[in-house]
Image (cartoon, rainbow, N blue to C red):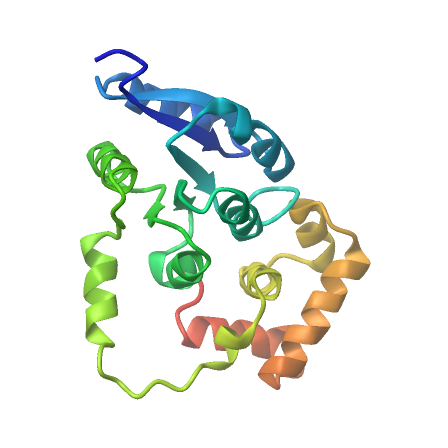
């Protein structure tokens, strides 16, 4: 198949080894080509426009801005463009947030190469993609009266801060991880504690473990 007829994929991930691994997987397919790549959110927003891509593979944890923020901006500019989110996090943590923000699908980085290729082909064809495990999880909750849990009321950045604190990271380490100031991360922490009616990071961590928000 010629490159002109192939599905063009743009990869946005801050880990070079992950990008190379994804490119290697896609190099073994006849109908998918990589048309560009970026290592942070700002570069992704600047370069995806030039790539002529049909699908964006977007890491949910970018160093300068969250993947969901990048997703929302991409969908604002190109609503028809398929964005497939990639994450190290378990599906039930971020999948629903991603889909609500406009993602065409969600995959964990532990997914098999065959599943990645299937997902790209599916979203490129205008369909949604979720794994069988996530589909079952969603089906289990169909018909339930659902009152939003405290963590579901958080903004994307607040939720990301919650999971990082609960995983044992300090405010300083989180600031470095997200390329934010310590003051900004502290403000996120304060806001999420108020919203969730918790007193400190220890209570936050217990909540995250109890609700399966971290491994």
Residue 26 is left or right of residue 43, and the answer is left
Q: Quadrant of residue 213?
A: bottom left
Residue at the image position 65 percent from the left and 78 percent from the top:
193
For the point 43% across and 59% down, the residue is 94
Give x and y (percent) for residue 77: 54, 43
User: Which residue occupies the extreme top position in the image?
Assistant: 2
- Classify 66 as above or below 121: below
Quarter-of-image position of residue 19: top left
Image quadrant of residue 196?
bottom right
Q: In this picture, is 198 found above or below 13? A: below
| Residue shown at 60% from the left, 39% from the top | 41
Report the side of 2 relative to 99 (left or right): left
Q: Residue at x 52, y 31 (%)?
A: 15
Q: Position of residue 129 (x, y in %)?
A: 26, 49
Q: Is residue 52 above or below residue 83?
A: above
Residue 167 locus on image (x, y percent):
53, 60
Whole-percent x and y of residue 63? 62, 42
């Amino acid at each position: 198949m010629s490159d002109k007829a192939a599905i063009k994929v743009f990869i946005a991930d801050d880990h070079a080894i992950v990008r190379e691994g994804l490119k290697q997987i896609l190099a073994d397919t006849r109908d998918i080509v990589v048309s560009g790549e970026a290592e942070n959110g700002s570069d992704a927003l600047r370069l995806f426009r030039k790539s002529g891509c049909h699908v964006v593979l977007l890491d949910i944890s970018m160093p300068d801005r969250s993947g969901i923020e990048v997703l929302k901006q991409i969908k604002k500019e190109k609503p028809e463009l398929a964005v497939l989110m990639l994450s190290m996090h378990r599906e039930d943590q971020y999948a629903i947030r991603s889909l609500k923000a406009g993602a065409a699908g969600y995959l964990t980085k532990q997914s098999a190469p065959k599943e990645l290729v299937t997902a790209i082909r599916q979203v490129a064809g205008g369909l949604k993609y979720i794994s069988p495990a996530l589909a079952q999880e969603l089906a289990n909750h169909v018909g339930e009266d659902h009152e939003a849990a405290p963590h579901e009321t958080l903004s994307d950045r607040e939720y990301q801060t919650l999971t990082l604190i609960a995983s044992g990271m300090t405010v300083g380490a989180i600031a470095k991880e997200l390329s934010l100031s310590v003051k900004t991360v502290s403000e996120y922490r304060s806001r999420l504690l108020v919203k969730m009616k918790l007193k400190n990071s220890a209570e936050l961590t217990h909540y995250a473990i109890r609700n399966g928000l971290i491994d």
